[in-house]
């Protein structure tokens, strides 16, 4: 058995995994006997109780939006089966680290309020919705095996499911601390599903001191929610500032000050040696590599996630970014098998590289693109523009609500405009081109401008941006560059 070091370093932040040089050619197809492939489709039509024409494995955002697209195309009723390890119909997972964690007196989010597809303005797909649409739902029964030759799935309960077309939407699992350094102690929490969030809420109601490990999305969102619980909260991370994969040091300092104004403490550049426990076995402290300890009764670990590829490893994995490798229509190397959402390593066309994106926006759009490609003459390559956002301190009584959006690529030199009162914008410029833009507290019209800028990548005058007296003026300069580019 491999040994693990006592000191654990960790990473968090933007979940956009992209090597800078990766070919976008269609991935090689693995041939399977066409006779058996056709035979399964015939069987699916003849034995509806034993065979499913379409099976989606996974119950997250991607599965919910895939179901909606099947319904829109008239191909769900009696044809579609969704297999999930959760006891709930697909829901908008981002709520779990945002409004779901609010105290009861702050109007927290609860199911069925955030079932898909309400996050994108669509219908709320409750369990009854799936029944009404003729979609078979298999709850709390994860897939444990797959026979590609026989096109058969095995579930944890022993069910054998034959499929005609398989869509893998298994998402990710939370990265965990090893048990040997206290990763499974009572009072230590990870957040990936409703059960995780419910367990954390139970602890928050009794907690006095909270330590959040990780300075990325989860760390920032959980710490902001903890302020509403009036807890003594500390965030620990190994980097020099918050959300280091996206924020510049200057931008991070502004957000860090906001958290500090709300009583949150930071321990930066730290490595954790282990978690300590008391006589009852519950976590009592976080021991750092430098010998210091931080007392706590509750710990939330938010150090990233891993693509949930098992048991589909043989479908074809990307060793650089992780996940299941697919082409621009989300086809894997095995005919009839697709992968969507967080688990898919796909061609990021705009930047000419392979990426794996852990974000709800991609989960929604990849599902829609894949199912349309499968069921219609829709054949164009997925052309995704990276998008990330966060919303924190949005509970009742908060002195300052935070909502930022980012589009594009954070490469090149960053130009920051604004004083965070309330707005601030950061523009990334590379070789004279605007590559990415982040905006805090923008108006709807300003937020709508961001993807246009990031996708068009107009030439822009860096000096003009640097001399802009306000965020509004900077955005006007960027919009003028967009118009100039279009006129050329």
Image (tube, rainbow, N blue to C red):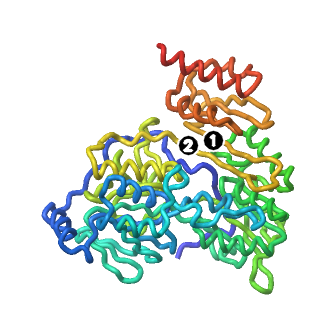
Residue placed furthest toward the bottom: 280
Residue at 52%, 50% (x, y): give it.
120
Residue at 83%, 46% (x, y): give it.
257
Residue at 79%, 66% (x, y): give it.
210
Mark 2, secondary structure of its residue = strand
In-image side of 304 versus 339 (left or right): right
Name above or below for residue 227 compared with residue 487: below
Q: Which residue is mark 1?
A: 405
Q: Give the x, y percent position of residue 378.
A: 30, 43
Residue placed most toward the observer, 131 or 267: 131
State the image quarter where residue 165 is shown: bottom left
Q: Are marks 1 and 2 in contact (CB under 8 Å)?
A: yes
Residue 145 seen in the current view:
yes
- Cα separation, mark 1 vs mark 2, equals 7 Å
Residue 288 seen in the current view:
no
The numbered mark, 1 or 2, whose residue comes first in the sequence reads: 2
Q: Which residue is mark 2?
A: 387
Residue at 77%, 58% (x, y): give it.
235
Q: Give the x, y percent position of residue 412.
A: 60, 31
Mark 1, secondary structure of its residue = strand
């Amino acid at each position: 058995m491999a040994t693990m070091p006592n000191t654990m370093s960790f990473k968090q932040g933007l979940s956009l995994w992209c090597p800078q040089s990766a070919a976008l050619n269609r991935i090689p197809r693995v041939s399977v006997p066409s006779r058996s492939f056709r035979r399964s489709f015939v069987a699916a039509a003849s034995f509806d109780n034993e065979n499913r024409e379409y099976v989606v494995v996974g119950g997250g955002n991607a599965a919910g939006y895939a179901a909606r697209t099947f319904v829109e195309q008239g191909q769900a009723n009696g044809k579609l089966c969704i297999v999930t390890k959760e006891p709930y119909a697909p829901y908008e997972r981002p709520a779990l680290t945002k409004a779901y964690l609010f105290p009861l007196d702050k109007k927290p989010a609860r199911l069925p309020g955030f079932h898909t597809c309400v996050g994108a303005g669509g219908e709320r797909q409750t369990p009854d919705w799936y029944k009404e649409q003729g979609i078979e739902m298999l709850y709390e029964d994860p897939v444990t095996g797959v026979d590609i030759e026989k096109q058969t799935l095995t579930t944890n309960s022993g069910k054998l499911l034959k499929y005609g077309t398989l869509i893998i939407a298994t998402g990710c699992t939370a990265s965990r601390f090893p048990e040997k350094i206290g990763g499974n102690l009572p009072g230590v929490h990870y957040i990936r599903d409703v059960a995780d969030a419910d367990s954390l809420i139970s602890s928050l109601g009794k907690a006095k001191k909270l330590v959040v490990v990780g300075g990325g999305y989860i760390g920032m969102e959980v710490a902001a929610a903890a302020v509403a619980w009036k807890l003594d909260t500390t965030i620990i991370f190994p980097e020099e500032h918050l959300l280091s994969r996206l924020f510049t040091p200057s931008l991070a300092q502004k957000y860090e000050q906001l958290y500090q104004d709300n009583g949150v403490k930071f321990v930066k550049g730290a490595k954790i040696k282990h978690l300590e426990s008391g006589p009852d076995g519950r976590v009592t402290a976080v021991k750092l590599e430098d010998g210091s300890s931080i007392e706590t009764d509750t710990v939330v670990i938010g150090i990233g996630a891993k693509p949930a590829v098992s048991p589909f490893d043989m479908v074809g994995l990307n060793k650089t970014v992780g996940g299941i490798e697919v082409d621009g229509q989300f086809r894997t190397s095995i005919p009839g098998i697709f992968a969507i959402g967080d688990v898919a390593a796909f061609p990021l066309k705009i930047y000419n590289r392979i990426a794996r994106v852990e974000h709800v926006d991609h989960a929604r759009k990849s599902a829609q693109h894949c199912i349309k490609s499968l069921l219609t003459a829709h054949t164009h390559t997925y052309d995704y523009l990276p998008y990330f956002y966060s919303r924190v301190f949005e509970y009742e009584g908060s002195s300052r609500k935070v909502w930022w959006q980012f589009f594009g690529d954070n490469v090149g030199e960053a130009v920051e405009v604004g004083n965070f009162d309330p707005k601030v914008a950061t523009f990334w410029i590379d070789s004279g081109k605007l590559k990415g833009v982040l905006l805090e507290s923008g108006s709807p019209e300003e937020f709508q401008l961001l993807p246009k800028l990031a996708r068009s990548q107009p030439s822009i005058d860096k000096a003009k941006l640097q001399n802009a007296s306000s965020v509004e003026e900077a955005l006007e300069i960027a919009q003028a560059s967009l118009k100039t580019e279009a006129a050329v």
